[in-house]
Image (spheres, grey):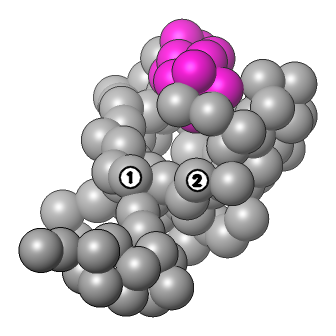
Amino acid sequence: MPTYIGLMRWTQKGIENVKDSPARLDAAKAAFQAAGAEIKEFYMVMGQYDMVVVTEAESEDAAVKATLAVAANGSVRSETLRAYTEDEYRRLIGELP
């Protein structure tokens, strides 16, 4: 399954209700599951972003649906990157002319 990296920032609403964040993470995991995706890893980070998630999805459509479902609650903004594993990277580079 394709892997995605989500770079997330709390919105004003999200940080005002930061104590609810663990429950929102549980809800996000359920939303991803319902959309055909899975949150594989979660990190709270310091710096430009507040959280990083590593996810897998059955398809790009599933990844988009899951991300939109989570963002729709208004507590986070996200930037999603398609990630390639080392094996995928080596295969892609190896297929270059």
The reply to whether residue 51 is in sight is no
Camera-side residue of 10 and 60: 60
Task: Report the residue that reaches farthest toward the top.
Answer: 72
Residue under numbered circle 2: 2
- Residue drawn at (46%, 75%) of the image: 88
**Which amino acid type is marked by label 2?**
Pro
Horizontal side of 27 relative to 54 (left or right) equals right
Horizontal side of 68 relative to 84 (left or right) equals right
Q: Of marks 1 and 2, which one's residue comes earlier in the chain?
A: 2
Q: Indicate yes or no whether the magenta region holds residue 45.
A: no
Camera-side residue of 8 and 75: 8
- Residue drawn at (41%, 79%) of the image: 91
Element on which disc 1 rests: strand
**Which amino acid type is marked by label 1?**
Arg
Q: Indicate yes or no whether the magenta region holds residue 72.
A: yes
Which disc is residue 28 wearing? none
Camera-side residue of 62 and 13: 62
Question: Would you place residue 96 above or below residue 16 in this image?
Answer: below
The reply to whether residue 42 is in sight is yes
Element on which disc 2 rests: loop
Report how far apart the C-alphas of labels 1 and 2 lie in the structure.
Answer: 8 Å
Image quarter for residue 66? Answer: top right
Residue 18 percent across, percent down from the top left:
57, 45
Residue 74 percent across, percent down from the top left:
48, 17
Task: Report the residue that reaches farthest toward the left.
Answer: 97
- Residue drawn at (63%, 33%) of the image: 59
Residue under numbered circle 1: 82
Q: Where is the C terminus found, in terms of image quarters?
A: bottom left
Query: What is the magenta range?
Result: 61-73
Task: Give neighbour class at mark 2: few <14, some 14-19, many 20+ (Cα, 10 Å).
Answer: some
Question: Would you place residue 31 above or below residue 53 in this image?
Answer: above
